[in-house]
Image (cartoon, coloured by chain):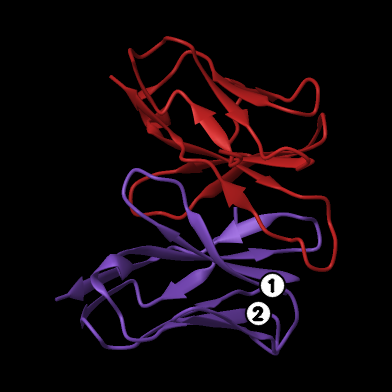
Chain colours: A purple, B red
Amino acid sequence: GQQLNQSPQSMFIQEGEDVSMNCTSSSIFNTWLWYKQDPGEGPVLLIALYKAGELTSNGRLTAQFGITRKDSFLNISASIPSDVGIYFCAGQDTGNQFYFGTGTSLTVIP
Amino acid sequence: DTGVSQNPRHKITKRGQNVTFRCDPISEHNRLYWYRQTLGQGPEFLTYFQNEAQLEKSRLLSDRFSAERPKGSFSTLEIQRTEQGDSAMYLCASSPPLSPTTGELFFGEGSRLTVL
């Protein structure tokens, strides 16, 4: 199945710094989703985006649905230790199928 | 708790044995998905149900894999004659009926399979 290109693959940052990650696809999507996954757990939905150009925030998280409908980015402001985890993007196509990125591993150094 | 529920959370089995995983989706979610995830990878699609109908199956789903959702509520994923390559986290997710603002996919905590 299709996997989306997600970058960076990993990030090591100091507590308090901002984080940015993005996801690109060769296909157009109707919905973009961002998830966080802790070890041994299922992914937890952070933000959902439904319209091209849409910018949505959830606390310190902000995500945007790219104008081309082939990309999305996620920003985390003022990172804290509990932000540690793996972040996945996912896109939903017209066939109601969801495709996932390869993940960005985030480490926050106190 | 009204989230997606999966059990067992962990299963260790010997090669060649059959295993079955159960998923209880969020109530009123008519769409249910099964994914497989291996270390360092994102979830990979296995199969998808809308109500009781299995609408799509991935090529990853070999003949040894079968999934059911008999009454459009809970679902089971069975793996027959397990192989070591089947070791992975099996994730179930559910999604509400389609609308312009309900394209979310909610995951359970997963069932981790280890085949010895």
Locate residue B81, reporting x and y percent. 47, 13
The residue closer to the viewer here, A16 or A42, is A16
Q: Chain of mark 2?
A: A
The residue closer to the viewer here, A63 or B42, is A63
Looking at the rendered structure, the secondary structure element under dot 1 is loop
Whether pointer 1 and pointer 2 mark residues with C-beta atoms closer than 8 Å, the reply is yes
Q: Residues within 10 Å of mark 2 (few under 14, many from 20)?
A: some
Q: Residues within 10 Å of mark 1 (few under 14, many from 20)?
A: some
Q: CA distance from mark 1 to mark 2?
A: 6 Å
Judged from this view, the residue extending furthest toward the front is B1
Q: Amino acid at mark 1?
A: Ser
Q: Amino acid at mark 2?
A: Lys
User: Residues at marks 1 and 2, common chain?
Assistant: yes
The disc at residue A70 is: 2
**Relative to B95, residue A16 above or below:** below
The residue identified by callout 1 is A27
The disc at residue B42 is: none
Locate residue B44, reporting x and y percent. 54, 48
The residue closer to the viewer here, B43 or A49, is A49
Q: Residue at x 14, y 76 (%)?
A: A110
Q: Residue at x 55, y 38 (%)?
A: B1
Q: Chain of mark 1?
A: A
Q: Quadrant of residue A32?
A: bottom right
Locate residue B55, reporting x and y percent. 80, 39
Locate residue A33, reporting x and y percent. 60, 67
Residue A31 lies left or right of residue B42; in this view the side is right
Q: Residue at x 61, y 40 (%)?
A: B2
Q: Quadrant of residue B11?
A: top left
